[in-house]
Image: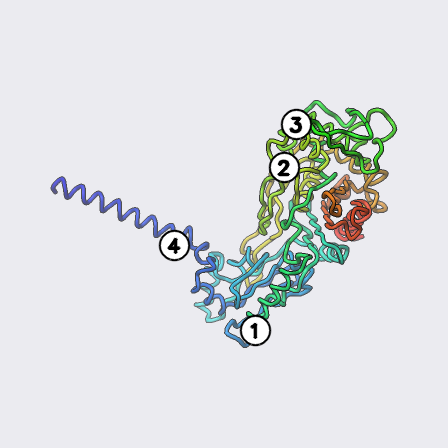
């Protein structure tokens, strides 16, 4: 063989290997993503022949498919549609659109993903029609109903989760909408409904639990500030800070006060634990400046700030910005300024404290179920990471329990149950306040962590508070989970 032929043979061999690798990658690794690409018309048309799997909560279908007389073969039907809308979303083959779990779990529900391969082989051999796989969620029907009913008439959201596993037990957002109206096969009717929902000032299409226009977390963020202080090793719950009635922000002429306009208790100084119990702004602003924005941001990120989570619904990252000046850092100490958060994130803060300082990744899919009720794929509980040591978590818990029992969060008290909680009443300039609560129960053996946000002042402008409006909502959700 001549030298030129040898070179040509080597080149041809490398070209063949590259072609083989590329086609193998496309057919094996990228097959699922290509199959689920909305521009893949063939997969979409094939899916019309498959009865879509159900979405299941507590053994009952909250979304299912029934035969229809049109070209799409099956009509999607939702039970308690508005209550479950933030979770299920909707599926509409006429529009080629889907949201929520319908979108996130489409490969399984539609029977077009890799997990459905053996089911399709079985269908071919048996001659039986193929059905999509069902998706079993971790949500608790009683908790979801309690959250939705407690939020009625309000713009707000609730997230409840199991602190030990990260399993989401409730994800409510109001106002809601009827997903059945968005699932109709009349494209004109569905588009008309969509236009109405987009024009609604209440923004019912926004899932406020994990996305939408994020709000400052207010005093609920004091838990993160305290965690950063204790973790530094330089501060304890009994460490004291100056206790003026008015505090001028560093490098600024702007002044802040506590919610009631006075000092945080009677003394010239106040402890961090007492500042959390009474929800005082000034001591936490002073503490934040002492800590610096880097220390607070690092702690916030240990709880999940500045990260998006797929539950599998993607969340908007809660934000603690970099390079804050001292004035903005002071404001961040009590959850104002440039800090923003979702209820999911603030539930993760409480859940991490409840779980001895370990933050779990949030999830709401327990399993993918086959047509024979076999488990095709089960979810595993995974850790996001350790935010604080168990001793620090216990110290923060003690202050949260005191806040509910005889402090600023008494609206969450439950007879016979020690509830750990923290309220927040976030200012928005001249606009109505944003009202918050986050906490967990029972404090000594937590079964549920919850976060509540109520926008637009709960209809009370700047008169409403986290304790009077958000905390009672959390109380009802906790009671539902605990079966009280």
Dot placed on the residue nearer the N-terminal end, 2 or 3: 3
In three-dimensional space, the C-alpha distance between marks 1 and 3, rounded to whole angstroms, equals 61 Å
User: Which-is-in-front pick, marks 2 and 1?
Assistant: 2
Q: On the image, numbered disc 4 is attached to which residue?
A: 27
Colour theme: rainbow
Q: Residue drawn at (59%, 68%), measured in percent from left and top?
A: 190
The label number, if any, that marks residue 67 in the structure image: 1
Outermost residue, front side: 253
* 54 relative to 302, above or below: below
Q: Residue drawn at (79%, 34%), measured in percent from left and top?
A: 257
* 262 relative to 183, above or below: above
* 438 relative to 205, above or below: above
Q: On the image, numbered disc 2 is attached to which residue?
A: 320
User: Which-is-in-front pick, marks 1 and 3?
Assistant: 3
Contact, mark 3 vs mark 4 (Cβ under 8 Å): no
Q: Can residue 230 be seen at all in this image of the molecule?
A: no
Q: Residues within 10 Å of mark 1 (few under 14, many from 20)?
A: few
């Amino acid at each position: 063989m001549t030298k030129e032929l040898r070179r040509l043979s080597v080149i041809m061999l490398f070209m063949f290997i590259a072609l083989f690798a590329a086609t193998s990658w496309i057919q094996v690794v990228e097959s699922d993503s290509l199959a689920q690409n909305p521009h893949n018309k063939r997969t979409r048309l094939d899916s019309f022949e498959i009865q879509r799997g159900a979405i299941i909560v507590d053994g009952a279908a909250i979304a299912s498919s029934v035969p229809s007389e049109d070209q799409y073969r099956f009509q999607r039907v939702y039970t308690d549609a508005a209550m479950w809308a933030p979770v299920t979303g909707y599926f509409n083959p006429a529009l080629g659109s889907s949201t929520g779990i319908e979108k996130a779990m489409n490969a399984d529900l539609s029977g077009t993903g890799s997990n459905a391969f053996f089911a399709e082989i079985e269908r071919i051999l048996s001659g039986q029609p193929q059905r999509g796989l069902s998706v079993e969620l971790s949500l608790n029907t009683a908790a979801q109903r309690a959250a939705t009913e407690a939020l009625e008439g309000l713009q707000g959201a609730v997230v409840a989760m199991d602190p030990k596993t990260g399993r989401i037990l409730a994800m409510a957002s109001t106002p809601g909408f009827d997903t059945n109206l968005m699932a109709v096969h009349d494209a004109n009717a569905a588009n008309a409904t969509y236009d109405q929902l987009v024009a609604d000032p209440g923004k019912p299409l926004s899932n406020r639990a994990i996305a939408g226009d994020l709000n400052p977390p207010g005093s609920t963020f004091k838990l993160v500030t305290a965690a950063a202080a204790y973790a530094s090793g330089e501060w304890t719950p009994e460490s004291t800070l100056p206790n003026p009635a008015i505090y001028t922000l560093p490098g600024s002429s702007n002044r802040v006060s506590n919610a009631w306009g006075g000092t945080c208790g009677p003394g010239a100084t106040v402890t961090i634990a007492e500042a959390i119990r009474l929800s005082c702004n000034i001591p936490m602003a002073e503490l934040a400046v002492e800590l610096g924005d880097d220390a607070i941001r690092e702690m916030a990120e240990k709880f999940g700030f500045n990260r998006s989570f797929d539950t599998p619904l993607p969340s908007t990252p809660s934000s603690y910005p970099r390079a804050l000046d001292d004035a903005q850092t002071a404001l961040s100490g009590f959850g104002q300024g440039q800090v923003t958060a979702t209820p999911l994130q603030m539930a993760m803060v409480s859940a991490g404290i409840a779980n001895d300082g370990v933050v779990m990744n949030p999830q709401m899919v327990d399993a993918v179920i086959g047509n024979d009720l076999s488990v095709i794929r089960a979810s595993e509980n995974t850790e996001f990471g350790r935010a604080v040591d168990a001793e620090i978590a216990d110290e923060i818990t003690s202050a949260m329990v005191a806040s509910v029992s005889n402090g600023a969060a008494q609206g969450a008290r439950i007879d016979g149950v020690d509830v750990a909680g923290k309220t927040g009443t976030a200012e928005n300039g001249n606009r109505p306040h944003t009202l918050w609560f986050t906490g967990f129960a029972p404090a000594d053996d937590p079964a549920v962590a919850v976060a509540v946000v109520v926008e637009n002042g709960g209809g009370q402008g700047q008169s409403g508070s986290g304790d009077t409006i958000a905390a009672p909502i959390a109380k009802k959700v906790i009671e539902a989970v605990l079966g009280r």
